[in-house]
Image (cartoon, rainbow, N blue to C red):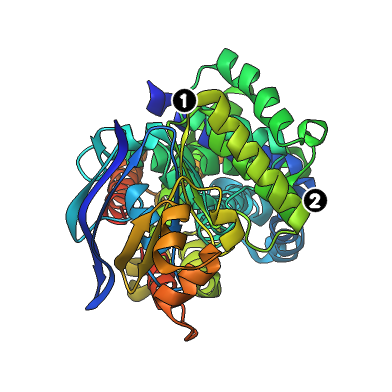
């Protein structure tokens, strides 16, 4: 049973095609990696799947609901950790979680149960009454993960969740996420630039210039392209040329315009 | 039902931020206090107000309106901050109707503005105005109306605003004209035609007039028409804000 079904999904921004007719499925409990150079269309795809951005054409179902026709149903079933921070740093850690719980229609009792659970998971329970602006980058990221999991989503989207974090924090973040999957059968859709992290994925997609280049398990990809690491596969498929942030900046422009 | 709790928590967030940041509460009272006590005292001897009110008394409702106006618009404009710092995304990916987001923000901003206005109202004895429970009750009602209208205006602008650079523009070309043209600091009956015309276009004019009626018992326009005008303007502004939020989807 697929929790994400994407068919011919396309997004164009004034003539620039950021995502070009991609199709794939993500199964229940699967860790699905979305890999590609900067500007390949990763964030644009996540934003369409999260109902923040309307596709130009094609369709996407998340947990059986269409992202365009039934956005609120999709929003209920997903948790998201964005590439950029999205906490209110003028509030405490607990305030941020409580805010999230109410926005996701959780009842008060459930919120009170879940807050210690998710804070313990990311080892921030002792800091629950501290203002978020006093947190380090890694702590903020962990709090965002706790928040994304608070309402027990079916699918968790992680957009470069470990960007700019030290190796210790990165290792911890993967521990939490894989523990969550083991406990609750959560499906995980993630993008990352760290190829060692992508090795934990059940399957990975390599995307470039808005198109899917290949999709398979890390082992099969390595065998197919005769490489010992995913990094080798990635470079073989996408080349060594340095990319601009074209796709991301188009998205940023859109966010600012709207 | 889910939307009701979303409105509640958006409202509560603005209140918490207000409560946590007490230095801002004090700082934002500085300017109105200067207007009230320095300008009020200095101009009192050369001012003959209607029904024998002196200048400090006359501008008292105007200065309260000013406090409410500034706080309302600043609260609403914080949406632009939320967009820059990413928090708006957290709200927009939540399963909440866009109208509930706008209403929650409008109620939060207006409650904060109402609290600031209420602090100013407690200064009444210092300008020689005696407050009765009825005056307080009426004033709270009128302050909330003004606050809700001005927060709606702020949200409508913030929904279109790209970044904080535009903020100074909003202050110079929106807040200050609204304040100066509202009759907060002068009577509206002996003005040249061009200025008379401009004051009638300012939505705050009708709020200040109603608040002056509530506190001092003097007014320029019929109270019923004041309330209708404010209500209609608020409805239009908030509807535009909701449409803007729906479009950005």
Gap between marks 1 and 2, in whole Å?
28 Å
Decide if residue B214 is in sight here. Answer: no
Identified at 70% across, 24% down, the residue is A116
Relative horizontal placement of residue A191, taking residue A141 as reference (left or right):
left
SS under mark 1: helix
- Tell me: residue B4, above or below residue B29: above
**Mark 1 surroundings within 10 Å by alpha-carbon count, few (fewer than 14), some (14 through 19), many (20 or more):** many
Residue B90: percent from the left, percent from the top? 50, 46
Relative horizontal placement of residue A258, taking residue A189 as reference (left or right):
left
Residue B105: percent from the left, percent from the top? 48, 42
The chain carrying label 2 is: A
Name the residue that disc number 1 marks. Answer: B5
Name the residue that disc number 2 marks. Answer: A134
Residue B39: percent from the left, percent from the top? 71, 64
Identified at 52% across, 37% down, the residue is B10
Disc count in the image? 2
**The one of B214 and A1 positioned closer to us in this rendering:** A1
SS under mark 2: helix
- Tell me: residue A211, above or below residue B7: below
Contact between labelled residues 2 and 1, with CB atoms less than 8 Å apart: no
- Tell me: residue A233, above or below residue A99: below
Q: Which residue is farthest bottom?
A: A241
Q: Which residue is farthest top?
A: A109
Decide if residue B13 is in sight here. Answer: yes
Identified at 75% across, 41% down, the residue is B20
**The one of B63 and A141 positioned closer to us in this rendering:** A141
The chain carrying label 1 is: B
- Tell me: residue A256, above or below residue B219: below
Relative horizontal placement of residue A233, taking residue B47 as reference (left or right):
left
């Amino acid at each position: 049973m697929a929790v994400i079904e994407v068919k011919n999904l396309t997004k164009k921004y004034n003539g620039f095609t950021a995502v070009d007719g991609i199709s794939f499925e993500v199964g229940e409990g699967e860790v699905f990696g979305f890999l590609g150079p900067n500007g390949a269309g990763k964030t644009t795809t996540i934003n369409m799947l999260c109902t923040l951005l309307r596709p130009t054409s094609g369709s996407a179902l998340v947990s059986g609901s269409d992202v365009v026709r039934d956005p609120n149903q999709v929003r209920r079933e997903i948790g998201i950790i964005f590439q950029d921070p999205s906490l209110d740093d003028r509030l405490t850690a607990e305030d941020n979680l409580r805010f999230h719980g109410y926005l996701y229609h959780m009842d008060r009792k459930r919120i009170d149960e879940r807050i210690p659970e998710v804070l313990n998971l990311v080892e921030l329970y002792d800091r629950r009454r501290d203002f978020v602006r006093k947190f380090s980058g890694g702590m903020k990221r962990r709090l965002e993960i706790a928040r994304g999991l608070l309402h027990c989503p079916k699918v968790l989207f992680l957009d470069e969740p470990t960007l700019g974090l030290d190796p210790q924090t990165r290792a911890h973040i993967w521990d939490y996420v894989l523990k969550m999957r083991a406990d609750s059968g959560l499906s995980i859709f993630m993008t990352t630039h760290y190829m060692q992290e992508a090795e934990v994925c059940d399957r990975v997609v390599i995307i470039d210039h808005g198109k899917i280049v290949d999709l398979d398990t890390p082992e099969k990809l390595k065998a197919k392209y005769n490489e010992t690491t995913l990094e080798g596969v990635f470079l073989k498929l996408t080349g060594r040329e340095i990319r601009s942030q074209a796709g991301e900046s188009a998205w940023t422009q859109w966010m600012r315009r709207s | 039902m889910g939307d009701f709790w979303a409105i509640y928590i958006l409202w509560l967030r603005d209140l918490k931020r207000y409560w946590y940041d007490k230095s801002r509460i004090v700082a934002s009272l500085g300017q109105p206090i200067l207007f009230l006590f320095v300008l009020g005292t200095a101009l009192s001897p050369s001012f003959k107000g209607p029904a024998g009110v002196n200048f400090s008394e006359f501008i008292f409702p105007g200065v309260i309106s000013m406090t409410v106006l500034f706080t309302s618009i600043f609260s609403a404009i914080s949406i632009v901050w939320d967009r820059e710092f990413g928090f708006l995304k957290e709200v927009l990916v939540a399963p909440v109707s866009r109208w509930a987001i706008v209403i929650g923000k409008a109620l939060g901003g207006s409650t904060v503005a109402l609290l600031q206005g209420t602090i100013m109202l407690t200064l009444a004895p210092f300008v020689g105005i005696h407050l009765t429970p009825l005056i307080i009750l009426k004033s709270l009602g009128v302050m909330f109306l003004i606050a809700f209208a001005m927060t709606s205006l702020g949200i409508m602008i913030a929904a279109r605003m790209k970044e904080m650079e535009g903020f100074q523009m909003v202050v110079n070309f929106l807040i200050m004209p609204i304040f100066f043209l509202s009759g907060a600091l002068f009577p509206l009956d002996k003005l040249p035609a061009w200025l008379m015309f401009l004051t009638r276009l300012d939505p705050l004019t009708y709020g200040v007039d109603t608040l002056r009626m509530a506190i001092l018992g003097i007014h320029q326009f019929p109270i019923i028409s004041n309330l209708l005008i404010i209500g209609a303007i608020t409805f239009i502004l908030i509807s535009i804000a909701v449409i803007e939020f729906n479009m950005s989807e």
